[in-house]
Structure formats: structure tokens, C-alpha cells
């Protein structure tokens, strides 16, 4: 193995989608933005479509165009960013469904693509995307006669089931949408796990499909194996890596592995990070650099050919914790230099 290998278990992604789908009595879509959370949108979406997913969400129109080429005309592809300036031909050509976020987007859409499908996003308290109450009141009588495909909002604190914001947003969503003859959606992965009152007509899981928290029952999806380039003996008092941040206190064996922050192994992980040789944990030493990482393999019985950063013994969320970040960031940062292998 000359380059790091990122193995993506498409069967696990499908299993996670089916598990989340079984927890609701409504339609389950799939969020595949950011190149399928960094794992390859074409491969991920085709696997999910084969399992029965018929509605996909992307962040921007350009992602939707790529997805349409991969999946063909049948699935619905909704775009969270709505109808941005310059998106008209992309939306028309790929048959995308913009989720409109403002009065300006509503006007742009109905003027440039009359009769073309659209959804609507409402702000129920996250203050990120969507129409607030006054905006929704201003366009409601224009929007509803044109049969929007969906009215949705997004939960800010669904990963924390006891957070009072969840109930507050749920009540606000009811206030803004009760009585509408339009499919409704409030929940991504965290909202699905909050219970049926949050499910409405459609859910749109993202991180749970890819093995991340808060879906603790998810099957692991990703394995990352990194080759060892060289192993050297380091004497007591010698240092490893930039800025002499690690000093050997006893005779040590240090492996240099072929990955770094250019591959999404975040520099801030630093000395907190560990890798695995089989079931044995081995610590990173010195600073993580662009392409190389030092690892203390002194305690191993044999010299390893590769070490595992993500896999059976260490989840994406564990790795994220080394850098005080989220599994989302780890997944979407995984570098293009990895050799990607897909299994089912």
C-alpha cells in the first residue's frame, strides 16, 4: 500500500438509511450534500436510490446537477440554498427543486421559472436560513396556489434531546404550517430520534447515514488505513517533528505515516490523536504536518506496514474529539489523495 486507503461501506450506509426509515411512518429522504458528506456523492446516492430512496437533498444547485447526471430523471433533488442569482438554468436543466428561503428568492423563482416546482424553508428559531413569520405572511398567498412540494424547517438543537429549543421550534413550526395542504418536514437525523411528533411527512437524515452521532445505533461506514513510510530509532533527548514539540524520554521507535492535514487529518489533533495497529493503540508524536505524521510504535511486537486512524476501534466522532470538533468536519475534510474503495 503506497497511499492511504479510505474504505467506504455502502452497505452500511444503506442499512443506516433503512434503520432510520423504519423509525418513522413517513417518507425518508437522504441528505447527500458536500459530496455525500465527503464519501462520494455518486456512489452514495446510487446505493441509496437502489435501496429505495426517492428524494435527495443537496446544498447548492451545482451539486444537484452532478447528482441528476448520476441518478437520472426519476428522483426528486431539492436544493437547500434555494434559487440563487445565476441558478435559473441549472435548476431548469437538471429539474431541481429549490427550497426558497426569502421573499427575494420567491420573486426570482416565479418570475424566471413560472410553474417550476419549489419548496419553502421557514425559520422557526435557528436564524440561519428560511423565511421568518412576517416574510411568510407576505408571500403565503402567492406561494400556496402554486403547489409547493414541501414546507420545511431545521432544528438547531436536535442532538440534545432535552434541550428546550426542540419543543419551542416544534410549536413554532405548527403555528406557521398547521392547516396547510402541503407536505411538511422538520427533522434530520437528530429530529428522527426525538420521536414521531417531529416526523411530519418527510424526514431527511444526513450524518446518521454515515455512521455519526447522534445515531449511536448506526453501523460504522468509514475505515482509513495509512501506510508507514519509514520507522526509525529515536534516542532519549531527541525530538520529533516541527518545533521540537515531542522529546523522547526513553529509546523509542517512531513510524512516519503518509497522511497529514492536506488529507483532512486536522493539525489541531496534535498529541491527543491515536491510531491503531490491530487492537493496539499507538499515539501520534510531534506536530501533524501537511503530508506526514509521526507515531510512536515502540510497544508493538512487529513493525507495522500501515496504521488505522478510523475503523473498528476508533469512530469518526472519536477522531473528531481529538481536535475538539465534530464528525461532520472529519468526514467532509477527508482528502482527495486517498485511494477510495467501496464495499457492500
Image (tube, rainbow, N blue to C red):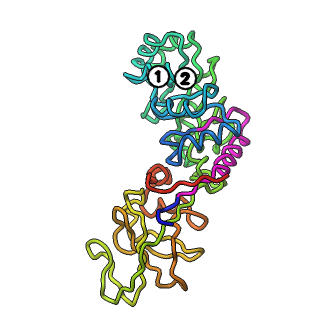
| Label 2 sits on residue | 176
N-terminal label among 2 and 1 = 1
Local secondary structure at mark 1: helix
Task: Please say if 238 is above or below 37.
Answer: below
Residue 127 lies, in percent from the top left, at: 42, 34
Q: Are marks 2 and 1 in contact (CB under 8 Å)?
A: yes
Task: Please say if 178 is above or below 21.
Answer: above
Local secondary structure at mark 2: helix
Magenta segment: 6-30
Q: Using a 10 Å C-alpha cutoff, classify the residue at mark 1 as few (fewer than 14 neighbours), some (14 to 19) or many (20 or more).
A: some
Asked whether residue 322 is drawn in magenta, I would say no
Residue 200 lies, in percent from the top left, at: 66, 31
Task: Please say if 175 is above or below 28.
Answer: above
Residue 197: in sight, yes or no? no
| Label 1 sits on residue | 133
Q: Give whichever of 75, 201 is nearer the camera.
A: 75
Asked whether residue 21 is drawn in magenta, I would say yes
Q: Quadrant of residue 180?
A: top right
For residue 166, side relative to residue 102 (left or right): right
Amino acid at each position: 500500500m503506497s497511499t492511504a486507503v479510505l474504505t467506504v461501506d455502502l452497505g452500511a450506509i444503506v442499512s443506516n438509511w433503512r434503520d432510520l426509515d423504519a423509525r418513522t411512518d413517513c417518507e425518508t429522504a437522504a441528505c447527500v450534500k458536500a459530496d455525500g458528506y465527503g464519501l462520494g456523492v455518486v456512489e452514495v446516492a446510487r446505493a441509496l436510490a437502489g435501496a429505495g430512496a426517492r428524494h435527495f437533498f443537496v446544498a447548492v444547485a451545482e451539486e444537484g446537477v452532478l447528482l441528476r447526471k448520476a441518478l437520472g430523471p426519476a428522483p426528486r433533488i431539492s436544493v437547500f440554498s434555494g434559487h440563487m442569482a445565476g441558478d435559473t438554468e441549472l435548476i431548469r436543466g437538471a429539474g431541481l427543486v429549490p427550497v426558497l428561503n426569502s421573499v427575494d428568492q420567491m420573486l426570482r423563482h416565479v418570475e424566471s421559472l413560472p410553474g417550476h416546482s419549489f419548496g419553502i424553508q421557514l425559520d422557526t428559531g435557528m436564524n440561519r436560513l428560511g423565511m421568518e413569520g412576517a416574510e411568510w405572511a407576505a408571500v403565503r398567498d402567492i406561494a400556496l396556489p402554486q403547489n409547493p412540494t414541501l414546507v420545511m424547517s431545521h432544528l438547531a438543537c436536535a442532538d440534545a434531546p432535552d434541550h428546550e429549543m426542540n419543543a419551542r421550534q416544534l410549536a413554532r413550526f405548527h403555528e406557521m404550517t398547521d392547516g396547510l395542504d402541503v407536505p411538511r418536514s422538520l427533522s434530520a437525523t437528530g429530529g428522527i430520534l426525538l420521536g414521531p411528533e417531529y416526523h411530519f411527512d418527510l424526514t431527511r437524515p444526513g450524518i446518521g447515514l454515515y455512521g455519526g452521532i447522534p445515531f449511536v445505533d448506526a453501523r460504522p461506514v468509514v475505515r482509513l488505513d495509512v501506510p508507514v513510510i519509514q520507522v526509525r530509532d529515536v534516542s532519549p533527548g531527541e525530538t520529533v517533528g516541527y518545533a521540537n514539540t515531542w522529546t523522547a524520554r526513553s529509546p523509542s521507535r517512531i513510524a512516519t505515516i503518509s497522511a497529514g492535514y492536506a488529507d483532512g487529518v486536522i493539525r489541531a489533533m496534535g498529541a491527543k490523536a491515536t491510531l491503531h495497529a490491530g487492537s493496539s493503540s499507538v499515539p501520534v508524536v510531534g506536530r501533524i504536518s501537511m503530508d506526514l505524521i509521526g507515531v510512536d510504535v515502540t510497544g508493538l511486537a512487529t513493525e507495522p506496514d500501515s496504521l488505522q486512524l478510523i475503523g473498528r476501534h476508533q469512530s469518526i466522532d472519536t477522531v473528531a474529539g481529538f481536535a475538539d470538533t465534530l464528525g461532520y468536519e472529519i468526514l467532509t475534510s477527508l482528502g482527495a489523495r486517498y485511494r477510495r474503495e467501496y464495499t457492500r
